[in-house]
Image (cartoon, rainbow, N blue to C red):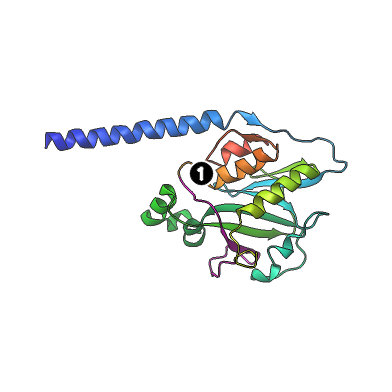
């Protein structure tokens, strides 16, 4: 019995040390700022960084001189099929989390383990908006054409495509509303590469405000407050 208690104590101690290092690394690395924000509006494109309190999305105008996102993510794939939207938000994450965990109360141990260990599939979640409202979870940022093109390519590169080069729609009834859809994506979600890591890397690559590394939405949003 004593040996068992020693082993259990060692395991618990290891978990606590890992957790302390994990959260400390995020706290430090997420605060080291990368990129910059524009202040002048002329010739710039309005984008947003959006969070639902846990998960972050990149929000872009549906149509610019470079891209009409409805040609990539057709409105016909949404339940509402509305034509008066102006913005599109795009996020990446674990497919099981997206489809099986609309709320935290729906989270199962199986879903959490698959996501945490990086052995599950991933998806892009796309949502159309008529308007964006700035608040503590939604921040406007002005970007130039080059930054937009970097974000555009980053999003397109994250898509898993069929043999004809088209995004693969995930047929599901798990949409969160009338204006969203899911698509198969590349990459693996894990404890060290979360949905927010994906967003942070996109912002960092586009030379926009971001941290060195983070797995939490707060690690990104702090640079926009």
Q: Quadrant of residue 204?
A: top right
Q: Is residue 92 above or below residue 217?
A: below
Q: Which residues are magenta?
A: 169-190
Say which element carries label 1.
loop
Viewer-proximal residue among 202 and 58: 202
- Residue 159 location (% of width, % of height): 61, 57
- Residue 182 location (% of width, % of height): 58, 62
Q: Quadrant of residue 31?
A: top right
Return the residue found at the far left: 1
Residue 79 located left or right of residue 4: right
- Residue 70 location (% of width, % of height): 73, 64
Residue beneath the point at 56% across and 35% down: 213
Residue beneath the point at 80% across and 46% down: 45
Q: Is residue 37 above or below residue 187?
A: above
Residue beneath the point at 38% across and 33% down: 18
- Does the segment drawn in magenta span residue 8? no
Return the residue found at the far front: 163
Residue located beneath label 1 in the image:
193
Q: Quadrant of residue 197?
A: top right
Label 1: few (<14), some or many (≥20) within 10 Å? some
How many marks the image carries: the answer is 1
Rendered-image quadrant of the C terminus: top right
């Amino acid at each position: 019995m004593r040996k068992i208690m020693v082993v259990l104590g060692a395991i618990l101690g290891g978990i606590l040390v890992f957790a302390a290092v994990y959260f400390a690394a995020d706290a430090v690395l997420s605060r080291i700022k990368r990129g910059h924000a524009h202040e002048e509006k002329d010739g710039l494109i309005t984008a947003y960084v959006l969070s639902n309190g846990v998960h972050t999305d990149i929000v872009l105008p549906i149509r610019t001189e470079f891209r009409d996102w409805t040609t990539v993510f057709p409105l016909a794939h949404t339940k509402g099929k509305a034509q008066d939207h102006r913005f599109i938000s795009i996020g990446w994450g674990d497919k099981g989390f997206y489809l099986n965990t609309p709320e935290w109360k729906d989270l199962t141990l199986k879903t959490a383990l698959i996501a945490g260990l990086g052995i599950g599939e991933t998806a892009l979640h796309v949502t159309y908006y008529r308007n964006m409202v700035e608040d503590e979870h939604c921040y406007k940022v002005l970007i130039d054409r080059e930054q937009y093109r970097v974000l555009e390519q980053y999003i397109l590169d994250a898509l898993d495509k069929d043999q004809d080069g088209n995004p693969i729609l995930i047929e599901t009834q798990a949409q969160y509303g009338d204006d969203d859809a899911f698509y198969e994506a590349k990459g693996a979600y894990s404890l060290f590469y979360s949905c927010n890591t994906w967003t942070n890397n996109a912002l960092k690559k586009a030379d926009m405000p971001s941290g060195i590394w983070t797995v939490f939405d707060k690690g990104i949003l702090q640079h926009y407050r």
